[in-house]
Amino acid sequence: MTIAKTHHAEKVVRIIVRIGPLSGIEPLLLESAFSISCAGTIAEEAEFLTETLPIRVLCNNCGVESEAAINNLLCQNCGGYNTKLLSGDELILARVELENAD
């Protein structure tokens, strides 16, 4: 854990990641992989939390930004299908909480 070493932490307390529904990441599988990969490290007991990000699109027809569904990237304003994906495919390390000796 490079972040923990950089900050001279003794323990990683919590890690929060944000996952978009279109990222291809399955949160439960990521959590399982995290616990396996952290065994025997200072992050072994860390709480691992995921937050789901919304899918947002920008309509190239009317210019409105709106939320969309996984299988329906239509503009919520005009119903247009000519949209640009703005968010929903991310995997972001949002926060790492550390514990120091002092």
Image (tube, rainbow, N blue to C red):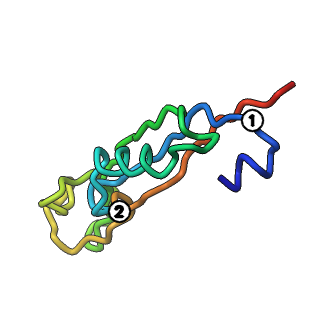
Disc 1 marks a residue whose amino acid type is Glu
Q: Residue at x 87, y 24 (%)?
A: 102
Is 69 left or right of 10, judged from the image as shown? left
Residue 26 percent coordinates (x, y):
27, 53
Question: Residue 75 is drawn in which quadrant?
Answer: bottom left
Residue 6 vs residue 61, the one in the foreground: 6
Residues packed near mark 2 inside 10 Å, few (<14), some (14 to 19) or many (20 plus): some
Residue 15 vs residue 33, the one in the foreground: 33
Residue under label 1, please give it: 10
Q: Residue at x 72, y 30 (%)?
A: 99
**For the residue labelled by badge 2, is the local secondary structure a helix, a strand or a loop?**
loop
| Nearest to viewer (mark 1 / mark 2) | 1
Q: How many marks?
A: 2
Residue under label 2, please give it: 89
Relative to 59, is 88 above or below?
Answer: above
Mark 1 vs 2, N-terminal side: 1
Residue 40 percent coordinates (x, y):
56, 43
**For the residue labelled by badge 1, is the local secondary structure a helix, a strand or a loop?**
loop
Residue 78 percent coordinates (x, y):
17, 60
Residue 63 percent coordinates (x, y):
34, 65
For the view shown, which residue lies furthest in the right direction? Answer: 102
Residue 76 vs residue 56, the one in the foreground: 56
